[in-house]
Image (cartoon, rainbow, N blue to C red):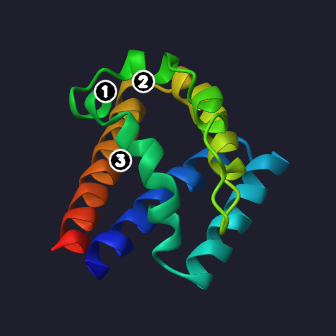
């Protein structure tokens, strides 16, 4: 189970770093980076536990490679309809999605494939983590 948590956090960190590299002066992504580091430091499972429900909600789009549908989905309003976690403010996730969406639209095909592969890996680690957790 620890392996899935480590890989999930590492993959999500890669995506955050990619967004930060494209928008280096963006205070939102800097805040997301800080919150991510804090959450992982407090409890390594916190990030996967908080972000997994939203990721799993779109698992079919990710698994089927329906990237245009995924990118055009209004995640932010659907996420904000949910009650925030008592432990972590889901605001960081809401803020990361539009930045990733904006970045994705400007990427070339090779870069898009990397993002797509990363999202599939996140989904895979997430499913494996929860399967191991329930065993």
Q: How much space separates mark 3 and mark 1, taking CA atoms?
A: 14 Å
Q: How much space separates mark 1 and mark 2, taking CA atoms?
A: 6 Å
Confirm or deny contact between disc 1 and disc 2 (CB under 8 A).
yes
| Res. 61 mark | 1
Quickly name the residue at label 2.
70
Q: Which element is circle 3 on?
A: helix
Does residue 22 appear in this view?
no
Q: How much space separates mark 3 and mark 2, taking CA atoms?
A: 14 Å
The residue drawn where x is 44% and y is 48% is 53
CA neighbours of label 3 inside 10 A, class few (<14), some (14 to 19), many (20+): some
The residue drawn where x is 27% and y is 77% is 3
The residue drawn where x is 63% and y is 59% is 85
Compared with 46, 120 (above or below) is above
Compared with 48, 27 (above or below) is above
For residue 97, side relative to residue 108 (left or right): right
Q: Position of residue 71 (x, y in %)?
A: 48, 23
User: Disc 3 or disc 2, which is closer to the eye?
Assistant: 2
Quickly name the residue at label 3.
118
User: Disc 3 or disc 1, which is closer to the eye?
Assistant: 1
Q: Which badge, 1 or 2, comes first in the chain's sequence? A: 1
Quarter of the picture containing the C terminus is: bottom left
Q: Position of residue 6 (x, y in %)?
A: 37, 75
Q: Position of residue 12 (x, y in %)?
A: 47, 57
Q: Which badge, 3 or 1, comes first in the chain's sequence? A: 1
Q: Which element is circle 1 on?
A: helix
CA neighbours of label 2 inside 10 A, class few (<14), some (14 to 19), many (20+): some
For residue 54, side relative to residue 128 (left or right): right
The residue drawn where x is 34% and y is 36% is 116
Confirm or deny contact between disc 3 and disc 1 (CB under 8 A).
no
Q: Which badge, 3 or 2, comes first in the chain's sequence? A: 2
CA neighbours of label 1 inside 10 A, class few (<14), some (14 to 19), many (20+): some
């Amino acid at each position: 189970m620890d392996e899935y948590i480590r890989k999930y956090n590492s993959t999500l960190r890669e995506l955050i770093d990619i967004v930060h590299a494209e928008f280096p002066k963006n205070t939102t992504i800097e805040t997301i980076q800080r919150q991510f580091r804090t959450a992982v430091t407090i409890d390594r499972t916190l990030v996967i536990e908080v972000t997994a429900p939203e990721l799993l909600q779109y698992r079919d789009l990710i698994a089927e490679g329906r990237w245009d549908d995924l990118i055009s989905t209004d995640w932010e309003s659907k996420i904000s309809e949910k009650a925030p976690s008592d432990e972590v403010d889901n605001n960081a996730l809401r803020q990361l999605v539009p930045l990733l969406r904006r970045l994705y639209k400007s990427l070339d095909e090779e870069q898009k494939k990397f993002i797509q592969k990363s999202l599939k890996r996140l989904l895979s680690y997430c499913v494996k983590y929860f399967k191991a957790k329930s065993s």
